[in-house]
């Protein structure tokens, strides 16, 4: 069976229609395929559409819940962590050059930097690891282009 045909159910199913555990599985599988396959054999427009959904999942704000001791507890859903990992993988394997793709890249990096200020340690660790990976893969010029608007808004 063609390896790309294994991606069909993942690419044809909107993540919003899945349970959180199914979303996690789909994102994990897609990250695996992107890391191991030649990305030129993957139908990019469909992957890009799914990545836009992943960006929304990764940007969900975690509200605190009360733990058994009555203290506020911040815990990220596993789908958020998988979404951040998948965004890192996608940004490392694809050259996103069109205006729409650059907008996506800017939103992803904005999300990464916003996530560094989160209270959830697992989110911060995942984002730091992703940024480190992207920098080591020489995505620094892209990183500089994306951080310029963020830093100018902070000033």
Image (spheres, rainbow, N blue to C red):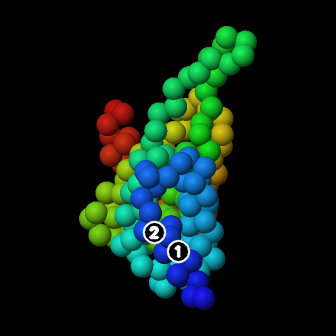
Asked if labels 2 and 1 touch by Cβ distance under 8 angstroms, the answer is yes
**Rendering quarter of residue 28:** bottom right
At x 52%, y 81%, the residue is 5
Residue 16: x %, y % from top left? 43, 51
Q: Quadrant location of the N terminus?
A: bottom right
Q: Is residue 101 positioned above or below 40 on the image? A: above
Q: Residue furthest left?
A: 99
Q: Residues within 10 Å of mark 1 (few under 14, many from 20)?
A: some
Q: Is residue 148 left or right of residue 121?
A: left
Answer whether residue 61 is visible to the viewer in this image: yes
Res 11 label: 2
105 or 61, nearer to the observer: 61
Q: Secondary structure at mark 2?
A: helix
Q: Secondary structure at mark 1?
A: helix
User: Circle 1 is placed at which residue position?
Assistant: 7
At x 46%, y 39%, the residue is 60
**Rendering quarter of residue 154:** top left
At x 59%, y 40%, the residue is 77
Q: CA distance from mark 1 to mark 2?
A: 6 Å
């Amino acid at each position: 069976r063609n390896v790309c045909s294994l991606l069909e159910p993942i690419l044809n199913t909107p993540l919003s229609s899945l349970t959180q555990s199914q979303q996690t599985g789909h994102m994990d599988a897609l990250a695996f395929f992107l890391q191991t396959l030649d990305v030129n054999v993957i139908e990019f427009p469909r992957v890009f559409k799914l990545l836009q959904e992943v960006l929304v999942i990764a940007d969900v704000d975690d509200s605190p819940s009360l733990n058994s001791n009555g203290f506020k507890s911040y815990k990220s859903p596993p789908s958020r962590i998988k979404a951040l990992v998948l965004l890192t993988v996608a940004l490392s394997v694809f050259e996103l050059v069109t205006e729409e793709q650059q907008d996506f890249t800017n939103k992803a990096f904005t999300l990464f930097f916003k996530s560094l200020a989160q209270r959830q340690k697992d989110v911060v660790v995942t984002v730091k690891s992703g940024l480190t990976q992207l920098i080591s893969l020489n995505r620094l010029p892209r990183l500089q282009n994306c951080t310029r608007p963020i830093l100018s808004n902070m000033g």
